[in-house]
Image (cartoon, rainbow, N blue to C red):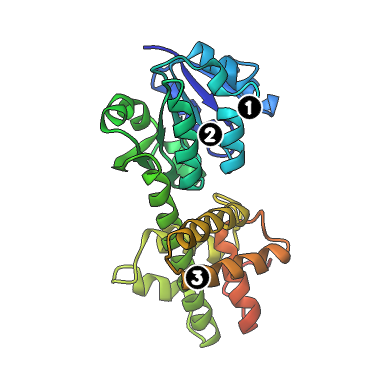
Amino acid sequence: MGKIGFIGLGIMGKPMSKNLLKAGYQLVVYNRSRAAVEELVAAGAEAAGSPREVAERCDKFITMLPNSPEVKEVALGPKGLIEGARPGSILIDMSSIDPYVTREIAAELAKKGVRMLDAPVSGSEPKAIQGTLAIMVGGKEEDFAECYPLLKAMGSSVVRVGDIGAGNVAKLANQIIVALNMAAMSEALVLAAKAGVDPELLYQAIRGGLAGSAVLDMKTPMVLAGNFKPGFRINLHIKDLANALAAAHGIGVPLPLTSLVMEIFQSLKVDGLGEADHSAIVRFYEKMAQVKVRKEPG
């Protein structure tokens, strides 16, 4: 088993890389913040001084970065992966980025014989810690098959949805559904609260029917407790919806509801909630209706 590179040890990348160590993989890690690198080294990983060095020491390397510019810089920039990668090696980008940038990066890497999969994930920090992420993969069938065991160490669901870029298209679709689901949940809870119905009892009454969802079960208890500690930040959801809108508009797909939720998130960002969990979308509706769903102040 060769060494695996891992670049990007943030809120998701750190637990994902730890799960690879637990699964028996040898890791070479790089991150701009040294504290995260030192934590992984203490857990058994090796440190690298640049993405280029990661690629020189590994045949497979994973990136988990904030957005398209960071992935492009790490892959193709100075001291980037492309400078150290050997022909036949493979980049697995697990970031959530613009699928058109994914295809651009893959085309440049292919000139050096380097393969690429895009494999963004769904599931917040707890699922990253548990190793139960949903992973959506784009790329060649044979590359996917080769990397499947590696991905399975980080996720409970690993599905190839098409060629390169398809993983990020699937992730953008996922983020649209999550955002709209939370908006609908928030409207319903605020309606119940202002009508004098206990939102907790409303939740118990509807969760087993057609309105039930993973979003409802994961986020309603947080909302009712006033717990907006981020599993997934509003600022990150804004980034994903911006990518969704750009990709959709580029191919002539109007997204009217996505546009509306995007503006709600922008309003919350202006209110200083950009670093809160995206379930804080309920605060927008509470403010408009002048009612509190939450049992705790805040």
The disc placed on residue 57 is none
First along the sequence among labels 1 and 3: 1
Q: Is residue 44 visible?
A: no
Residue kind at label 1, given as amino acid type: Asn
First along the sequence among labels 1 and 2: 2
Element on which disc 3 rests: helix
What is the x, y in percent for residue 98?
A: 50, 48
| Label 3 CA crowd tier, 10 Å (few <14, some 14–19, many 20+) | many
Q: Measuring 30% from the left and 33% from the top, which residue is drawn there?
A: 140
Residue furthest out toward the bottom: 195
For the residues marked 1 and 2, what is the alpha-carbon distance in whole angstroms? 10 Å
First along the sequence among labels 2 and 3: 2
Q: Nearer the viewer, residue 83 or 242?
A: 83
The residue that label 3 is drawn on is 183
Q: Nearer the viewer, residue 178 or 100?
A: 100
Point out the frontmost of discs 1 and 3. Answer: 1
Residue kind at label 3, given as amino acid type: Ala
What is the x, y in percent for residue 95?
A: 50, 40
For the residues marked 2 and 3, what is the alpha-carbon distance in whole angstroms? 27 Å
What is the x, y in percent for residue 184?
A: 46, 73
The residue that label 1 is drawn on is 31
What is the x, y in percent for residue 286?
A: 61, 76
| Tally of marks | 3
The disc placed on residue 13 is 2
